[in-house]
Amino acid sequence: AVDPEHHRARDVGDEPLLLAREALTVICRRRVDGARKLAAEGADIIIMDDGFQSARLVFDFALLVVDSGRGIGNGHLVPSGPVRAPIGNQLRHANALLKLGHGSAADPLVRRAARAGKPVYVAETVRTDAGSLDGVKVLAWAGIADPEKFFKTVRETGAVIEETRSFPDHHHFSEDEIADLIDRAASRGYTLVTTAKDMVRLEPGHGRAGELAAKSRVIEIEVRFDDPAAPGKIIDAALASARARRLRERKAG
């Protein structure tokens, strides 16, 4: 189990550390073992990322998530494209589709889901951090899968992006990279801004890593559904499916 008070991102990963702030989180090389650990720890519901890639677990509810700005890109599988598993297989096994954002790139997949009778939910990422950046000159830096999406969020705060720095997803920063960010911002009078996912890789920071963490402002975001009842509907559907599955298993046994 991930303990945000004792573990570091270099040991357990940045995303697990963020998730552990909200709920019981387990990392495991074999997903089925991770699921068993969560069940033993008392979890009632297990939420798994990239679940379509696990063939040893039974899903009670499978949610296919697509970004409305990127869609499915060229439709090819990783590493030739952004798709983790064949779209046809994912859609066939999915219980519903979640469209993130209000762009049009995901619309072809939304139409396919609707024709297949799958519920379609819509949500967007919204800022939750307090304070204004309106008119503030910033150096925005991020080591995530889609830095441009973060930079777009920064612009929407009213900040003036003077410079950006992009790093690979889950990147662990070298001393030179950290120094460059701090010194460049200081020499130009820019405010440093980054993501919560990047910040957690600097904590607990020492030396210049701690300095970068202290000088960087985090743009906090959350996913907000157009239909506020949607998360409850998804949980209810998952629980109903689990009850029906257990009933079938008892009858079969």
Image: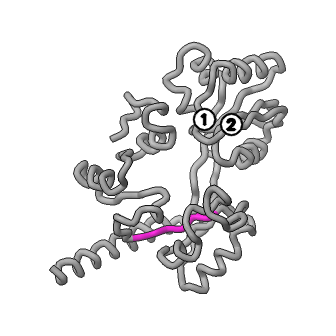
**Residue to which mark 2 is pinned:** 167
Which one is nearer the viewer's eye here, 120 or 31?
Answer: 31
Relative image position of residue 184 (x, y in whole percent): 78, 20
> Can residue 123 be seen in this snapshot?
no
Displayed quadrant of residue 175: top right
- Range shown magenta: 61-66
From the image, tell me which residue sits under label 1.
171
145 drawn magenta? no
Q: Which colour scheme is used?
A: one colour
Residue drawn at x 63%, y 56% as measured from the top left: 79
Q: Secondary structure beneath disc 1?
A: loop
Q: SS of the residue at dot 2?
A: loop
Among the 4 quarters of the image, the one containing residue 88? bottom right
Quick check: marks 1 and 2 in contact, CB under 8 Å? yes
The vertical placement of 108 against 10, above or below, is below
| Left or right of residue 89: residue 154 | right
**Which secondary structure dominates the residues rendered in magenta?**
strand
Tell which residue pokes out farthest to the top in this image.
207
In x, y percent, where is residue 89? 52, 75
